[in-house]
Image (spheres, helix red, strand yellow):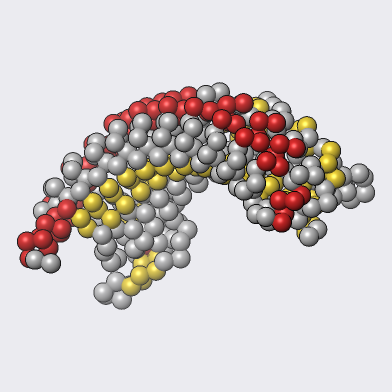
């Protein structure tokens, strides 16, 4: 590669770095026209400098898998050309680095443990402001495994090119904004393990490109809207653990997913993983579920589903279906099980939640 090309690439892209602290100096070293800044899975500690907002030509910013902390600067919203922003996974890792002076950087602690050793790092903080709507070119937004709070703003609906939205493992509350159904190009929506208190949007079926939908670990209530069964490309659906038993102060009336599984589920031909466990959903398992030939995981235990596992589901065990949990164990250890199942890998006692392998 020629010397001129080397200089060009150094100004337009940075892909790796060793242990350091991000400072405003990084912005002022001939990076004004940089388009790609990728520094993932290092031991970068400290806070994100607001001066990053001056890199107006930036298309992709990836700082995931480090040990950053503090509030995400509002200046990040000034990067209106961003197509990818990945600030995920800033705590809980096992990465350690050794600085040139011999000191060890441990990302489980703020400032890598070089300051107050026992001050735990909780990742990036702050809220998602309405300014998020300025990212009109955004295709991938990854903020999972941090400590963001607040709500998902309605302006999220402005991100019409968005394909990947991963906000799981934060402290985001409120309800699912109706504007989220405007994201017609979205393929991957992961909001699991937050503090959402919401029903499922009635227009969910308009998001026809959706492949992955995870809402488990929130306080989701109400019935599954028929529109969800219009998501023909859906491969993974997680609506489990929506009772929020560990957060009773967020309990709402009719807590958890209720109603029943519609016969329309047979139209989800690409479905591989279905988790509905730990919900008050009732009724029976429709035989149409057996039309989902790609099914690998089925979890319907700790529910009020009764009857028998349909005969056309058991043959799927000879294909892709490797894990089936249901309340086929004796109720309270002695009474009749909720479900009769001859092909379940694990039978659970509805009253205790104890599951025993039966395969």
Residue 18 relative to residue 221: left or right: left
**Residue 194 can be seen, yes or no:** no
Relative height, residue 167 to residue 282 (above, below): below
- Residue at horizontal 70%, vertical 31%? 263
Relative height, residue 339 to residue 38 (above, below): above
User: Which residue in the rendered view is the most extreme toward the left?
Assistant: 4
Identify which residue, 291 or 97, lies in the foreground.
Answer: 291
Identify which residue, 226 or 301, lies in the foreground.
Answer: 226
- Residue at horizontal 41%, vertical 54%? 90
Residue 198 relative to residue 99: left or right: right
Q: Position of residue 18 (x, y in %)?
A: 28, 66
Identify which residue, 10 or 312, lies in the foreground.
Answer: 312
- Residue at horizontal 63%, vertical 29%? 224
Assign the N terminus to one quadrant of the image: bottom left
Q: Position of residue 189 (x, y in %)?
A: 48, 40
Relative height, residue 277 to residue 99 (above, below): above
**Residue 43 can be seen, yes or no:** yes
Identify which residue, 44 or 264, lies in the foreground.
Answer: 264
Q: Position of residue 230 (x, y in %)?
A: 56, 30
Residue 118 relative to residue 87: left or right: right
Assign the C terminus to one quadrant of the image: bottom right
- Residue at horizontal 34%, vertical 63%? 43
Numbered-mark total: 0
Q: Position of residue 38 (x, y in %)?
A: 28, 55
Which quarter of the picture shows residue 242?
top right
């Amino acid at each position: 590669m020629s010397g001129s090309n080397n200089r060009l690439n150094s100004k337009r892209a940075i892909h790796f770095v060793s242990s350091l602290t991000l400072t405003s100096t990084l912005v002022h070293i001939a990076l004004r026209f940089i388009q790609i800044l990728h520094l993932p899975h290092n031991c970068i500690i400290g806070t994100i400098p607001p001066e990053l907002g001056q890199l107006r030509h930036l298309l992709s910013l990836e700082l995931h898998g480090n040990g950053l902390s503090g509030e995400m600067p509002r200046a990040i919203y000034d990067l209106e050309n961003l197509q990818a922003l990945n600030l995920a996974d800033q705590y809980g890792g096992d990465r350690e680095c050794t600085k040139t002076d011999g000191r060890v950087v441990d990302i489980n602690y703020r400032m890598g443990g070089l300051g107050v050793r026992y001050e735990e790092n909780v990742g990036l903080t702050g809220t998602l402001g309405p300014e998020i709507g300025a990212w009109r070119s955004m295709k991938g937004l990854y903020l999972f495994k941090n400590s963001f709070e607040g709500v998902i703003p309605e302006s999220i609906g402005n991100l019409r090119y968005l394909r990947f939205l991963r906000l799981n493992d934060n402290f985001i509350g409120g309800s699912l904004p109706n504007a989220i159904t405007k994201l017609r190009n979205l393929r991957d929506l992961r909001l699991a393990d937050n503090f959402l208190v919401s029903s499922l949007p009635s227009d969910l079926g308009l998001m026809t490109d959706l492949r992955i939908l995870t809402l488990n670990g929130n306080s989701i209530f109400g019935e599954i809207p028929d529109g969800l069964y219009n998501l023909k490309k859906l491969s993974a659906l997680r609506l489990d653990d929506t009772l929020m038993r560990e957060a009773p102060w967020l309990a709402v009336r009719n807590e958890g997913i209720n109603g029943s599984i519609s016969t329309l589920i047979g139209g989800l031909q690409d479905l591989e993983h279905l988790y509905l466990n730990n919900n008050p959903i009732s009724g029976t398992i429709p035989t149409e579920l057996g039309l989902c030939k790609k099914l690998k995981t089925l979890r319907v235990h700790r529910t009020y589903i009764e009857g028998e596992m349909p005969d056309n589901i058991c043959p799927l065990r000879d294909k892709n279906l490797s894990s089936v949990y249901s309340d086929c164990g004796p109720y309270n250890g002695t009474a009749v099980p909720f479900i009769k199942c001859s092909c379940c890998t694990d039978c659970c006692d509805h009253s205790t939640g104890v599951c025993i392998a039966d395969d």
